[in-house]
Image (tube, helix red, strand yellow):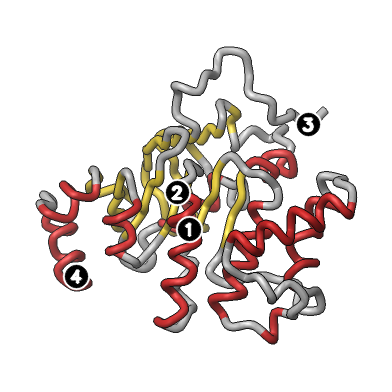
Amino acid sequence: MPRGFDPPTGWTPDQPLVAIDDVHKSFGEVEVLKGVSLSVRRGEVACIIGPSGSGKSTLIRCVNALVPFQKGSIKVLGIEVNDPHLDKLRLRKHVGMVFQQYNLFPHRTALENVMMAPVQVLKRLRAEAEAEAYALLKKVRLEGKEHAYPGEMSGGQQQRVAIARSLAMHPELMLFDEVTAALDPETVKEVLVAIRQLAEEGMTCILVTHEMGFAREVGNHVYFTDRGVIVEHGPPAEFFAAPRDPRTQAFLSQIL
């Protein structure tokens, strides 16, 4: 039988919600992650930054069991993500993910996009799911757009629908994979405002981001990755004010 997602005996909320230990991942001959370790406690926001190709997106896809890895351990609520018997669907009920591309169903309205998983996966009553979908779209400031189709909305609006859709599953953890990278500068802010609100409400988040100001403001911890390893990490104030590693210094000097 697939292993469920109920936390095992012995896991307590004072332990990390996410514990990543010595994770290695290769695509063919290319080693993308070379022994990455980090932990995130409940209610924390961890920001992962670094140049393209440094393994950031691969790492958080491993957390959600979208990408298998060859060595190491990732535990979410004490459950080993790389367990071959893991019920991935049940995992993803607890781990929401928002991608750079919004991945909305184009033939469904914003409301229908948000309602689909609660009705089809969680087997919620349609009226109940609809009421919550209205509330979630209001939460991400999309009142009045409930019956709009993705093609009728801006990129920033579509991304906020994607956030509402993930929240409809009542996740314990939210993963954000460069969610502003495809947006026009004027729409970036509205998406970051929605994520900031989640952080302020205590949602545990891991963000892969190029938005340094946002990482500085919202993150509890910042991790700089390069060539598959974590080069340096620390609280934002310390990390941005006095980076120690030359690679971190060079990266920040190019973008700040």
Q: Residue at x 61, y 50 (%)?
A: 96
Q: Which residue is mark 4?
A: 256
Query: Within 10 angstroms of label 2, few (less than 14), some, or many (20 or more) residues?
Result: some
Q: Depth check: 57 or 212 in front?
A: 212
Q: Which residue is mark 3?
A: 2
Disc on the earlier residue, 3 or 2: 3
**What is the C-alpha distance between the residues marked 3 and 1?**
33 Å
Horizontal and vertical percent position of residue 49: 33, 58
Disc on the earlier residue, 4 or 3: 3
Horizontal and vertical percent position of residue 58: 49, 55
Query: Within 10 angstroms of label 1, few (less than 14), some, or many (20 or more) residues?
Result: many
**What is the C-alpha distance between the residues marked 4 and 3?**
47 Å
Question: Which quarter of the picture shows residue 14?
Answer: top left
* Quarter occupied by the N terminus: top right
* Mark 4 element type: loop
Q: Is residue 109 above or below residue 59?
A: below
Of tags 4 and 3, which is closer to the observer?
Answer: 4
Q: Which residue is mark 2?
A: 199
Q: Residue at x 52, y 52 (%)?
A: 175
From where the camera sits, is residue 97 visible?
yes
Q: Residue at x 68, y 59 (%)?
A: 165
